Image (tube, rainbow, N blue to C red):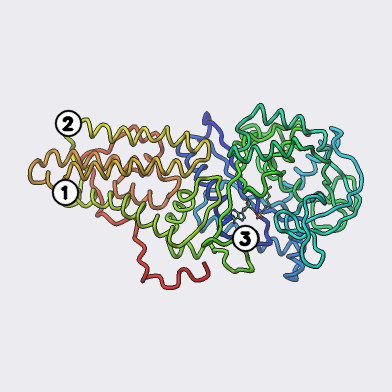
Amino acid sequence: MTAGKPAYYITTPIYYVNDDPHIGHAYTTLACDVLARFKRLDGFNVCFLTGTDEHGQKVEKSAAVAGVDPQSFTDRVSQNFRDLSQLLNFSNDDFIRTTEERHKVSCQALWRKLVAAGDIYLGSYAGWYAVRDEAYYAESELTDGPNGAKIAPSGAECEWVEEESYFFRLSSWGERLQKFYDDNPDFILPPSRRNEVVSFVKGGLKDLSISRTTFSWGIPVPDAPGHIMYVWLDALTNYITAVGFPDEQSESFRTFWPADVHMVGKDILRFHAVYWPAFLMAAGVAPPKRVYAHGWWTIEGEKMSKSLRNALVPAELVATYGLDQVRYFLLREVPFGNDGDFSHKAMVGRMNYDLANQFGNLAQRVLSMIAKNCDGRVPQPGELEAADEALLRAATALLQELRDEFDRQQFHGALTKTWEVVGAANRFIDHAAPWTLKKTDPARMATVLYVLADTIRRLAILCQAVMPDAMAAMLGQLSVDPAARDFAALESRLVPGTALPAPQPIFPRFVEEEAPGVREGA
Ligand code: MSP
């Protein structure tokens, strides 16, 4: 049932298949997954897209090293990213591969539109190119590395390229881009990243080489034998391919385009916030509504790299700490947009304190008291006191606060606010002391436990986007009907007398001795 629901389209970058998925990739997709789930629970018709970026010199070279043709190579490695979705419980609605026919058709149609608009011309490129970044660099941006190598600001080694090439007239789009940024102040978030992009564009734009002739692993340029499309033009186009481009009248395109959020890492912001809106505007297609650039993770203070062999493997993390614990940690630990460090100590701290002690223990205390003292059924409340009403109201009012945080991709803010209510519920139980009321005032004890159980239900509903499995278990312990777990259910209440299953702890504590060697390789 999607009719009448507002649409929400969110995308991850598509991942290069030369690399094994690591925590950096998992992070970008996780952020999108949480937003997608939150919006679905809030009644939106969501399209959540991820996929793999399979063309270009970098992938062609990796295939050659692996001794296979690029298509077999990408078929194999792309699967690793689908497996990542399974492992981390990502709820993407589609998975696009740039080697699919639908994408070739889409890229060629976009190219033709750019030609028709007069924004493409034939010239020749002579300059520096970094295969690792699949990016062109001006001489002035480079530094000297060992053995005369030229090094890009990203650390990638550049090579000199000279070839016939089609160019996109990016230089003529500077003013229109600046106007677009002015008219849409939240197009690029966080604001610090926006400022970077605005000053880059103000500094003047050069025309962009958008075809290559010295290798062949890419989408052919229409009517131009020997030319394949620059991999970034090909890759960016995935966002419109997936919703039906070039059929701009299709229901999916009309429903979902322009995208609500392209989530990207800070390293690839320029492609998304400068080149992509320029291509689209030139083709007469609306630009996306937002590009959000998040920061990078280091591991125990060190940059992740294959050579250091310390890139945390998502499967290992999940096996060590638990899936929802990792999901929670990644979004809670670092303000979204900043760089962050993954350390075993910080992970265990969040897992044991926020999850086990604060939230898990709250649920455990309430549910076991109900099991023991209320015949294992949702207790019958008496008249509510002001403090009861206040706690229930705080849990319900959280929804609007979370909407505001999620709409600006402030996951840590959303979780901090949620944990304020978890804290309030813990203070409430300590103050009301139902274990004492058991003897002195059993009716009041029933009311207190009811209020707490319903507060936990509300918190669990609101936390489902971040921790879907753990919250499903918690809602199961409260016998909440799976059909009554979306945000509309925040308005309802637990039905007194409902039988509850025997309570089970939801968030285990991490005990060091039980996991020897966890930090090895981290
Ligand atoms: N293929 C391009 C994207 C094309 S989108 C039209 C690409 N792929 S990538 O696989 O290299 O990177 C994908 C994402 O992973 C980027 O958003 C990047 O920022 C993110 N990360 C890679 N390493 C990371 C960390 N160490 N930490 C956080 N995110 C990181 O770029």
Residue 361 falls left or right of residue 404 = left
Residue under label 2, please give it. 383
Q: Residues within 10 Å of mark 2 (few under 14, many from 20)?
A: few
Q: Residues within 10 Å of mark 1 (few under 14, many from 20)?
A: few
CA gap, disc 3 and disc 2: 57 Å
Q: Secondary structure at mark 1?
A: loop
40, 301: nearer the viewer: 301
Q: Is residue 208 above or below residue 62?
A: above
Q: Earlier in the sequence, mark 3 or mark 1?
A: 3
Amino acid type for the residue under numbered disc 1: Asp
Residue under label 1, please give it. 375
147, 356: nearer the viewer: 147
Provide residue 313's location: percent of width, then percent of height: 54, 64
Amino acid type for the residue under numbered disc 3: Gln
Q: Earlier in the sequence, mark 1 or mark 2?
A: 1
Amino acid type for the residue under numbered disc 2: Glu
Provide residue 98's location: percent of width, then percent of height: 71, 51
The quarter holding residue 508 reads: bottom left
Q: Are marks 1 and 2 in contact (CB under 8 Å)?
A: no
CA gap, disc 3 and disc 1: 50 Å
Provide residue 151's location: percent of width, then percent of height: 76, 58
Mark 2 Cβ and ligand 1 under 8 Å apart = no
Mark 3 vs mark 2: in front: 2
Q: Secondary structure at mark 3?
A: helix
Residue 369 falls left or right of residue 136 = left
The quarter holding residue 169 reads: top right
Residue under label 3, please give it. 79
Q: Is residue 395 above or below residue 358?
A: above
Q: Secondary structure at mark 2?
A: loop
